[in-house]
Amino acid sequence: MHSLLIIIDTVIDLYLWVVIIWVIMSWLISFQVVNTQNRFVYLVSDFLHRLTEPALRPIRRVTPNLGGIDLAPLVLILILYFVRLLLREYLFPAL
């Protein structure tokens, strides 16, 4: 059971990094620092979008529209940290 909890904690940590990388990548694309005409940039961007969009879409429905500012990644990061802390606080000490 302990190894399963460690794997879940690691997956949450990796997904946090994927969300952070996606946010940075979207900023670089919107400020035209990187060009999506480049095949590698497009593939990385599309891959990150496909990983993060299923988790961000329900959050975007709930969060208010602030124009060009998307709060969904911030809310997702906070939720993932909360789940991670709950996992560590209530499940790890039991083992």
Image (cartoon, rainbow, N blue to C red):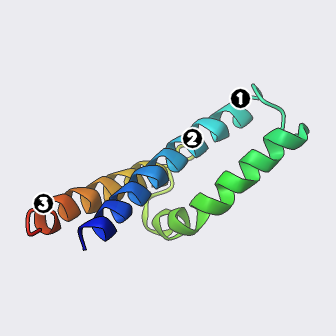
Q: Is residue 33 above or below residue 18?
A: above
Circle 3 residue: 89
Tell me which numbered mark, 2 or 1, is placed earlier along the sequence: 2
Towards the viewer: 3 or 9: 3
Query: Which mark, by number, is residue 21?
Result: 2
Residue that label 1 marks: 31
User: CA separation, marks 1 and 3?
Assistant: 40 Å
Q: Please give the name of the residue rendered at 74% of the width and 46% of the height, measured from the top-left corner.
A: 44
Of the two numbered discs 2 and 3 in the rendering, the one whose residue sits closer to the viewer = 3
**Which residue lies most toward the top here?**
33
What's the amino acid at mark 3? Glu
Near mark 2 (Cα within 10 A), the count class, few <14, some 14-19 or many ≥20, is some
Q: Residue at x 43, y 67 (%)?
A: 62
Instruction: Tell me the amino acid under the disc marked 2.
Output: Ile
Q: Residues within 10 Å of mark 3 (few under 14, many from 20)?
A: few
Marks 2 & 1, CB-CB < 8 Å contact: no
Query: Which numbered disc, 1 or 3, marks the residue that appears first in the sequence?
Result: 1
> Which of label 2 and label 1 is nearer to you?
2
